[in-house]
Image (tube, rainbow, N blue to C red):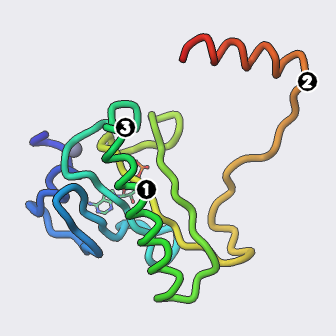
């Protein structure tokens, strides 16, 4: 995709702070990091989001994400990391080339507020389960 910024970064056409590269992915530092070391795993081929990604590539991306998270912990003494991946504008996706965020975390850092736990009922759960399962 000629006009996709992450295709161009992944291909090395636009310089980036690359932490790791192989034939399938490039891992770069995020330009607007949630925390020092925040990285993005970019497939070299263009997929708009998780729904079109091949299974083997998804496995590889997750494996690399785990390795990057472990390296962030060792490099800066972090306590943990989040692997986050946004699909669709409503979910916070702003670049429509699949990418996995690797965000290093410290206890109590308040870097991410993912969700406020809500509530449901057994009846609603039953109906919800049936509605989603019917679409699989
Ligand atoms: P998302 O909102 O999940 O689509 O994430 C896009 C991420 O890409 C954001 O965290 C941006 O800070 C980051 N980003 C956008 N452009 C660049 C770039 N040229 N180099 C590095 N990170 C970028
Ligand atoms: Zn792309």
Front one among 22 and 110: 22
Q: Residues within 10 Å of mark 3 (few under 14, many from 20)?
A: some
Question: Do callouts 3 and 1 mark residues in contact (Cβ within 8 Å)?
Answer: no
Looking at the picture, does residue 20 appear above or below residue 95? below
Cβ of mark 1 under 8 A from ligand 1: no
Q: CA distance from mark 3 to mark 1?
A: 14 Å
Instruction: Tell me: 99 left or right of 25.
Output: right
Give the position of the N terminus as an image quadrant: top left
Give the position of the C terminus as an image quadrant: top right
Instruction: Tell me: 72 left or right of 45.
Output: right
Q: Residue at x 47, y 44 (%)?
A: 86
Q: Residues within 10 Å of mark 2 (few under 14, many from 20)?
A: few
Measuring from the top left, give residue 19's x and y in whole percent. Answer: 29, 75
Labels 1, 2: front one: 1
Measuring from the top left, give residue 3's x and y in whole percent. Answer: 14, 42
Front one among 4 and 134: 134
User: What residue does disc 1 label?
Assistant: 62
User: What residue does disc 2 label?
Assistant: 121
Measuring from the top left, give residue 134's x and y in whole percent. Answer: 61, 11
Q: Residue at x 50, y 87 (%)?
A: 74
Q: CA distance from mark 1 to mark 2?
A: 34 Å
Looking at the picture, does residue 106 appear above or below residue 6? below
Front one among 38 and 54: 54
User: What residue does disc 3 label?
Assistant: 49
Q: Secondary structure at mark 3?
A: loop
Q: Residue at x 82, y 22 (%)?
A: 125
Q: Secondary structure at mark 2?
A: loop
């Amino acid at each position: 995709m000629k006009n996709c910024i992450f295709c161009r970064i992944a291909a090395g056409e636009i310089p980036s702070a690359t932490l790791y590269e192989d034939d399938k992915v490039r891992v770069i530092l995020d330009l607007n990091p949630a925390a020092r070391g925040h990285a993005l795993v970019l497939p070299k081929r263009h997929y708009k989001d998780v729904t079109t990604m091949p299974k083997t590539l998804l496995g590889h991306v997750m494996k690399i994400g785990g390795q990057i998270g472990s390296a962030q912990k060792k490099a800066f003494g972090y306590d943990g990391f989040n692997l986050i991946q946004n699909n669709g504008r409503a979910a916070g996706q702003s670049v429509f080339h699949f990418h996995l965020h690797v965000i290093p975390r410290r206890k109590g850092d308040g870097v991410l507020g993912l969700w406020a736990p809500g509530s449901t009922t057994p009846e609603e759960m039953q109906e919800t389960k049936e509605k989603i399962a019917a679409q699989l």
